[in-house]
Amino acid sequence: MISINSKIYVAGHKGLVGSAIIRKLKSKGYKKIITADRKKLNLTNQSKVFSFLKKHKPKFIFIAAAKVGGIYSNKKYKAEFIQENLSIQNNLIHSAYLSGVKNLIFLGSSCVYPRDCRQPIKEKYLLSGPLEPTNDAYAIAKIAGIKMCESYNKQYKTNYKCLMPTNTYGPNDNYHPLNSHFLPSLIRKVDLIKRKKSEKLYIWGNGKAKRELIYVDDLADACLYFMNKKTKEYLINIGTGKDNTINFFAKQILKVLIPDRKIIIKYDKSKPNGTPRKVLDISLAKKYGWKAKSNFKNSIIETYNSFKKKSIKSK
């Protein structure tokens, strides 16, 4: 059990997931939270990571640090995605072991599962087929992290858990025109339509690819829940268990953010669709007593408000 007075290190505390974990920890009364930005700690430098953990001696580590992006950046920068992510997670997991940290959560992604996987996707389907080519470098790095945690658990009796979230969105997301995931990209485009009085929304592909979404506050809640939950399994899917087409999500966001205007959706079929369908089997998480609670409409409004604040600050 990780007590309220335990030291907890959150790697990647400024990102979408890491910042949500920080908010959740603080809301639950945890005060000994350890963070370090890139200027203070280069996570790709193994000796510095080891020295940092040896000095601070956290009781628990959340590995939310990673190089992430959407289809465009995953295709274009495969070398950076595999090299940086392997370096970050290898350094953190191995240094945690060397420093005597027995408990951590490694955050992966649902893209670790095969492209044409049986649906809903069970944890046991890992490594059962070919990956989606557009983000296979990132996925392979994450798979290596999963197997590393499993190997250390078996050999060194550590308690390293791997949570595999579905597509995550929320405050503090990345809205870059080319490097963002599909939902923050939709929010940025809808905001542009709202401000410029445009009547058309352009989305990549044919809009038929299906995705499952989870609000980042729900994911952070799962992180704290499983931080203090004894589990037999080390790999656990985190999601809602429900999916819809990208076209459906686009219409829902328009309905929430621009309810008084009729916007035409146009499809850029020269761009890739990505994985055809991706919905997680969340029965294991449910068996342990956890499930997502957020309302989609409210969470979209919260995400949009955060986006607007971020846009104002960047000006």
Image (cartoon, rainbow, N blue to C red):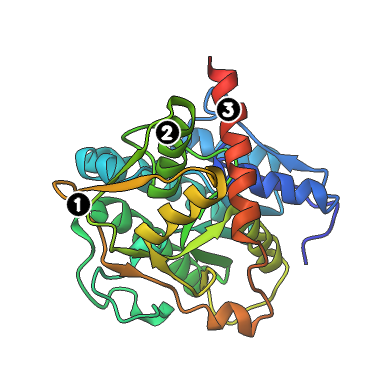
Q: Position of residue 213 (x, y in %)?
A: 49, 61
User: How many residues crowd mark 2 within 10 Å: few (<14), some (14–19), many (20+)?
Assistant: some
Of the residues tagged 1 and 2, which is closer to the observer?
Answer: 2
Quadrant location of the N terminus?
Answer: bottom right
**Which comes before the other along the chain, label 1 or label 3?**
1
Report the residue at 26% width, 63% height from top. Answer: 275
The three-letter amino acid code for the residue at tag 3 is Lys
Question: What residue would you read off at disc 1?
Answer: 272
Q: Position of residue 283 (x, y in %)?
A: 54, 83
Q: Looking at this view, is 130 or 104 the one in front?
A: 130
Of the residues tagged 3 and 2, which is closer to the observer?
Answer: 2
Asked if disc 1 and disc 2 are in contact, CB closer than 8 Å, the reply is no
User: Could you tell me which secondary element the residue under label 1 belongs to?
Assistant: loop
Q: Looking at this view, is 105 or 72 the one in front?
A: 72
Relative to 221, 68 lies left or right: left
Report the residue at 55% width, 67% height from top. Answer: 161
Q: Quadrant of residue 247?
A: bottom left
The three-letter amino acid code for the residue at tag 2 is Ile
Question: What residue would you read off at disc 3?
Answer: 310
Q: Position of residue 30 (x, y in %)?
A: 82, 49
Asked if disc 1 and disc 3 are in contact, CB closer than 8 Å, the reply is no
Q: Is residue 7 above or below residue 274?
A: above
What separation in Å lies between label 1 and label 2 (alpha carbons)? 23 Å
What label does residue 156 carry, if any?
Answer: none
Residue at the left extreme? 270
User: Could you tell me which secondary element the residue under label 2 belongs to?
Assistant: helix
Report the residue at 48% width, 43% height from top. Answer: 261
Question: What residue would you read off at disc 2?
Answer: 193
What separation in Å lies between label 3 and label 2 (alpha carbons)? 18 Å
Q: Looking at this view, is 38 or 97 the one in front?
A: 38
User: Could you tell me which secondary element the residue under label 3 belongs to?
Assistant: helix
**Which comes before the other along the chain, label 3 or label 2?**
2
